[in-house]
Amino acid sequence: MTLHLLKLSVGSASVETLARWQATRLARTGALFHETRHHPRRAGEILDGGSIYWVVKGFVRVRQRIVRLERRASAERGRFCRIHLDPELIRTELQPRRPHQGWRYLEDMNAPPDAPAGAVPEEPPREMAAELRHLGLL
């Protein structure tokens, strides 16, 4: 069964900001990856078609396919995991998410569906956004 990761894109104001940051890393290193402290214990399920779903400004907005997981170590950082990503950013339907530290597992059945090709999901109306903030979801 496919399993995904859910991660906050800290510092990203939009999907475009995330895309620019990743393009810079790809140009600088020749690889696209995200590094995290812990290696997922359920790696086999993630590598069975899993993606990393990025939370930007309180909503899951985009995902990227996870290509591979690599265990790494350095004298400065100790052990960590490098998550190699497909460069294609696939927009999803907006799904509100609370802030959290690190990453979380995301079951396939709970993952937001991909947005229709070429569509950019709209922000929720102001009143709905205010209610979501009141509920602690934004």
Image: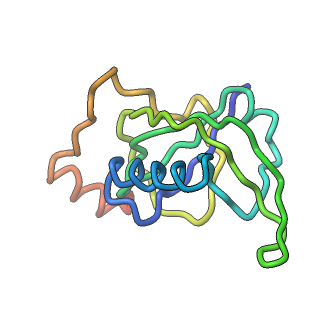
Relative to 97, say whether 101 is above or below: below
Residue name at image x 48 percent, y 51 percent: 22
The answer to whether 98 appears left or right of 102 in the picture is left
Residue name at image x 51 percent, y 50 percent: 27
Residue name at image x 21 percent, y 49 percent: 128
Q: How many marks?
A: 0
Quadrant position of residue 91: top left
Query: In the image shown, does 128 or 72 lie closer to the viewer?
Result: 72
The answer to whether 61 appears left or right of 70 in the picture is left
Q: Position of residue 117 (x, y in %)?
A: 33, 21
Query: In the image shown, does 70 or 7 lie closer to the viewer?
Result: 70
Q: Position of residue 14 (x, y in %)?
A: 32, 53
Q: Position of residue 21 (x, y in %)?
A: 44, 56
The answer to whether 26 appears left or right of 16 in the picture is right
Quadrant position of residue 120: top left
Query: In the image shown, does 34 or 119 lie closer to the viewer?
Result: 34
Assign the N terminus to one quadrant of the image.
top right
Farthest residue to the left: give it.
126
Quadrant position of residue 118: top left
Assign the C terminus to one quadrant of the image.
bottom left
The answer to whether 74 appears left or right of 32 in the picture is right
